[in-house]
Amino acid sequence: MKLKGKIAIVTGAARGMGRSHCLTLAAEGAHIVAADICHDVSAIGYSMAKRTELDETVEQVKSLGVKAVAVVADITSASDVSSMVDTAIREFGRIDILVNNAGVALIGVPIQDVTEEQWDRLMDVNAKGPFLCCKYVVPHMIRQKYGRIVSISSHCGLVGIATLAPYNCSKHAVVGLMRTLAAELTQHGITANAICPAAVNTPMLAEAYRLLGMSIEQSQKEWGAASLTNDIIPPEDISKAVAWLASDDARFITGRSILIGATNSLIP
């Protein structure tokens, strides 16, 4: 129970890694504000999570003996993010942990075939979204002189991978944001770190590869050279790292990009 009584906001919480993060943090005693967009996104060819899935996440969290609330929010909207943060403060009085997990992917598209709408949407969700969440959460963390910000980047946020230009660039932005926040916020008792996994077994990855006519199993071949185990990572393994970075065990870790499931030899 290393997070007992802490208050955590998790974006993209309805399914996949987001749900796993919620459950892992809750198992350590944290109360959860679970946020998700709960409607489909233009320029992304696969379906987003549904409100019923977000409600299922909240019920599973509550079954662990902690409190949880669901918030429908589009993290690319300043008003939605501000409202999400207001809900957290109204319900719990503080915010100790922010997990910037929500993201979208576009796989297998050469740069000349990427549309302006696709580029803008990936940058909005994957880069602007974490910026807005930090913008509205950080003032509360500064006032309480405590905070843990953990953002899910990607192995693609550290290297360049062909036919993933918008995704690569947006995930590099997440790493840059966390490094900047670490420099800005250390004096306030706030840490900021990025987790950079190789391929994680989530509905997002499965849907993105489905658009290419590939199964999640077939996609393993695409990631084998970058993986330590030649396998796709279970989301629970990423959530364990999130919980550690959110705990006081990692109070002196900030501005780091934690690579999970990929070999350091591929990082320049």
Image (cartoon, rainbow, N blue to C red):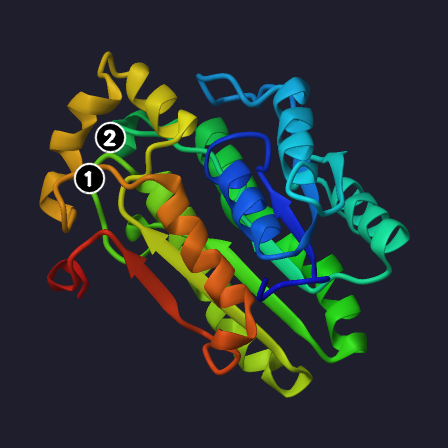
Q: Position of residue 247 (x, y in %)?
A: 55, 69
Tag 2–tag 1 contact (CB < 8 Å): yes
Residue extending farthest right: 90
- Taking the image as shown, residue 235 lies to the left or right of residue 184, namely left
- Taking the image as shown, residue 27 lies to the left or right of residue 140, namely left
| Residue type at numbered disc 1 | Ala
Q: In which quadrant is the N terminus drawn?
A: bottom right
Q: Earlier in the sequence, mark 2 or mark 1?
A: 2
Which class describes the residues within 10 Å of circle 1: few (<14), some (14-19), or many (20+)? few
- Taking the image as shown, residue 83 lies to the left or right of residue 8, namely right
| Residue type at numbered disc 2 | Pro
Q: Position of residue 174 (x, y in %)?
A: 46, 56
Cα–Cα gap, marks 2 and 1: 7 Å
Q: Nearer the viewer, residue 71 or 104?
A: 71
Q: Secondary structure at mark 1?
A: loop
Q: Nearer the viewer, residue 96 or 173?
A: 96
Q: Is residue 187 above or below residue 137?
A: below
Q: Name the residue: 20% across, 53% down.
A: 262
Q: Position of residue 190 (x, y in %)?
A: 62, 76
Q: Is residue 86 above or below residue 246?
A: above
Determine which quarter of the picture holds residue 220. top left
- Taking the image as shown, residue 246 lies to the left or right of residue 195, namely right
Residue at the disc numbered 1: 162
Choose mark 2 or mark 1, whichever is in front. Answer: 1
Q: Name the residue: 49% across, 40% down.
A: 20
Residue at the disc numbered 2: 110
Q: Name the residue: 52% across, 33% down.
A: 121
